Every structure is written in C-alpha cells, then in structure tokens.
Image: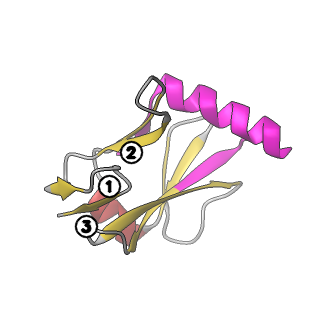
Amino acid sequence: MVQISEAAVARLHEVAKEQGVELVGVRVGVTGGGCSGLSYVLDFDTAPRLGDSVFGERPKIFVDRKSLVFLRGTTLDFEGGLNGKGFTFKNPNAKASCGCGSSFSV
C-alpha cells in the first residue's frame, strides 16, 4: 500500500489549482537515476493504466507494478519549514538515500 498524508493532499490541491488541473489522482513511481540509484516520480494523472495498483480516494494514487516493489509501505508527505519545503517520501524499503531525499537505494 502507498499512502498520502493530509499535508501532502492539501499541497497537491494547491498545486493542481495553480496549474488549472482537476485533482483526480497522482502517479507515484520510481525510475533509475539520482545519486543513490533510484529516483521518485510524482505527477498528476486521471486514470490508472493497465497493471497499476490503485490506493486511496480523492486523490487516488496510481502505482505501476515495477514501482510498487520499491514503494510498498511508502507515505508521500509534504513538509514545510525553515530548512526548506517540499514533498518527501517516507519509504521503509530504502536502505540509503541522498541528502536531499529525492533518490534512494534498496
């Protein structure tokens, strides 16, 4: 399962409004790259693709089969504060991550 915190949901609504899109769902995934080997992908989407797992409601979370192996149990959060703000991934599968938190290794 992949989850979204209330703070992340609130920020996603703000970003969707700024971009003029309806917040139906978000696609969360993993791609090769970054200083730790794997990078997170986050984008708006309106429907699942063939083979996707779907979690939650408003917004729905769409995760492709390959990414789910790396993201199972992950929570998407949004943090704001003096040290900067942005979306963060609390991933129990990550054995190491880079300093900025945008990439990880398993």
**Upstream in sequence: badge 2 or badge 1:** 2
Q: Which range of residues does the magenta coloring cover?
A: 1-27
Q: Quadrant of residue 35?
A: bottom left
Q: What is the C-alpha distance between the residues marked 3 and 1?
A: 15 Å
Q: Is 15 part of what is drawn in magenta?
A: yes
Q: For mark 2, does the 10 Å Cα neighbourhood hold few (<14), some (14 to 19), or many (20 or more) residues?
A: some
Q: Is 37 part of what is drawn in magenta?
A: no
Where the C terminus falls, by quadrant? bottom left
Find out whether the residues at labels 3 and 2 contact each other: C-beta distance under 8 Å. no
Find out whether the residues at labels 2 and 1 contact each other: C-beta distance under 8 Å. yes
Say what amino acid the circle numbered 2 marks: Val
* Mark 3 or 2: the one toward you: 3
Disc 2: which residue:
2
Give the left or right position of residue 45, taking residue 6 as reference. right
Q: Position of residue 89 (x, y in %)?
A: 36, 44
Question: What SS does tag 2 mark?
Answer: loop
Q: For mark 3, does the 10 Å Cα neighbourhood hold few (<14), some (14 to 19), or many (20 or more) residues?
A: some
Q: What is the C-alpha distance between the residues marked 2 and 1?
A: 7 Å
Identify which residue is drawn at 67% across, 57% down: 47
Disc 1: which residue:
71
Identify which residue is drawn at 71% across, 31% down: 14
The residue lying toward the viewer, choosing from 55 and 96, is 96
Give the left or right position of residue 89, taking residue 17 as reference. left
Residue 29 appears in the picture as rendered: yes
Disc 3: which residue:
36
